[in-house]
Amino acid sequence: MTLDYGFKVELFWLVSRTNNCQYCLGHQESKLLAAGRDEDRIAALDCDWDVFSPAERAAFAFARKYTFEPHLISDKDINALRAHFTDMQILEMLLSMSWNNAINRWKEGVGVPQNPDEGGYSRLVGEQATAPTGRPEEHQPSGTYLTPTSPQFQKTVSKVAPFVVVGASNPPASLPAMQRPPLEAPDIVLKRISEVTTRQPRLPLQDVDTTRQLMELPPDHMPENWMRLIANFPEEGSRRGKTLYAVQHSDHLTPLLKSQLAWIVARQDRAWYVIAHAMEDLRSQGLSDGQIFALDGDWTEYTPAERGLFRVARNLGASPVLLTDDEVQAAVRAAGPAAVVQAVEFVSQIAALNRISEAAGLPADDL
């Protein structure tokens, strides 16, 4: 991997800001300070990209779209990045930001509280960081995010966090937003699934034998295309791939429930590679196409536990800001805490797979 660590943390900050993950936002701010970024540069990430290079601005715009509107990623977006980055650097960004999105969903999905000492990251900063005033006596407080803000940023409005303004108050009250079009009709979905079986990937895939070795698969196991994509990075790709494979094949949730959750989340993201495989899995388990498309919203035939988990998957998959405490508690009452935690973990990983597979334009494996 060749991208600067601080740059990738900035991308993580932007993903977390878009997803409104306060837990991850705090940790990335601390890591940025430790990497030598100052408070003003962090503030500029939110509202003033003019201070950044053209390459950084291109990556930042992609990071927000990749997180908030993954269904709109196209050849044009990847080609725009190619003006500044190599294909392997683009893939490095995709890999990193996919699992940034997964971590956001994990933390927000189960409501992980912030660490009392903000994870100890302030110890990495120590006495070197100062307040925006630059006065050395105003050291960065240890264990807090309540640091001073420079005057030029005190009244700025975020250009990253999605929101809708409510009323005419000053400053405006706002609500988190999620913009996804209505789900497509079954005939359109089947057409898109047919198209994804023959499309050409936007980024290179690793060879089969190397991928099989890195993922530690049996000799007769044909690696899936998502494995071949991330196997371009032997260490990080292997680590992420083994985690995703383990979640997909664990026995914590039934195979049918996992396929149903994958379908629901992938439909929100228009992740056609994952949709194609989820449909094949659901058909192989005896569901008709009518029953599969009922997962798009008609859950009347399902139990309260299943409906609760489906709702968690749909809202968390689309955007962490949409999942409410009441919805999680309803799912816990109906399905139990273990099932909810396992569903959140599974959905988080599928959200990562959705983004990297669709941005890379992966063709479906043999179905």
Image (tube, grey):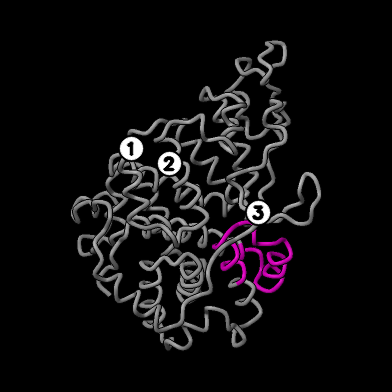
Residue at screen point 45% across, 55% down: 352
Mark on residue 332? none
Tally the marks: 3
Q: Closest to the observer: 200 or 328?
A: 200
User: Is 327 covered by the magenta stretch?
Assistant: yes
Q: Which residue is mark 2?
A: 59
Left or right: where 2 falls relative to 109? left
Secondary structure character of the magenta stretch overall: helix
Say which quadrant the N terminus sits in. Answer: top left
Callout 2 crowding tier (Cα within 10 Å): few <14, some 14–19, many ≥20: many
Residue 133: image quadrant is top right
Range drawn in magenta: 311-340
Q: Closest to the observer: 212 or 34?
A: 34
Circles 2, 3 touching at the beta carbon (< 8 Å): no
Instruction: Give the distance between the C-alpha atoms of the residues marked 1 and 3, in whole angstroms.
Output: 30 Å
Say above or below: 97 vs 326.
above
Say which quadrant the C terminus sits in. Answer: bottom left
Instruction: Give the distance between the C-alpha atoms of the residues marked 1 and 2, in whole angstroms.
Output: 9 Å
Residue 193: image quadrant is bottom left
Work out whether mark 1 precedes mark 3 in sequence or the reverse, and give the earlier one. Answer: 1
Query: Residue 354 placed where, x, y %?
Result: 43, 60
Work out whether mark 2 precedes mark 3 in sequence or the reverse, and give the earlier one. Answer: 2
Q: Which residue is mark 3?
A: 163
Query: Residue 332 placed where, x, y %?
Result: 68, 67
Q: Which residue is mark 1?
A: 84
Q: Amino acid at mark 3?
A: Phe
Callout 3 crowding tier (Cα within 10 Å): few <14, some 14–19, many ≥20: some
User: Is 151 covered by the magenta stretch?
Assistant: no
Say above or below: 102 vs 3.
below
* Residue 361 in sight from this viewpoint: yes
Circles 1, 3 touching at the beta carbon (< 8 Å): no
Residue at screen point 39% across, 47% down: 95
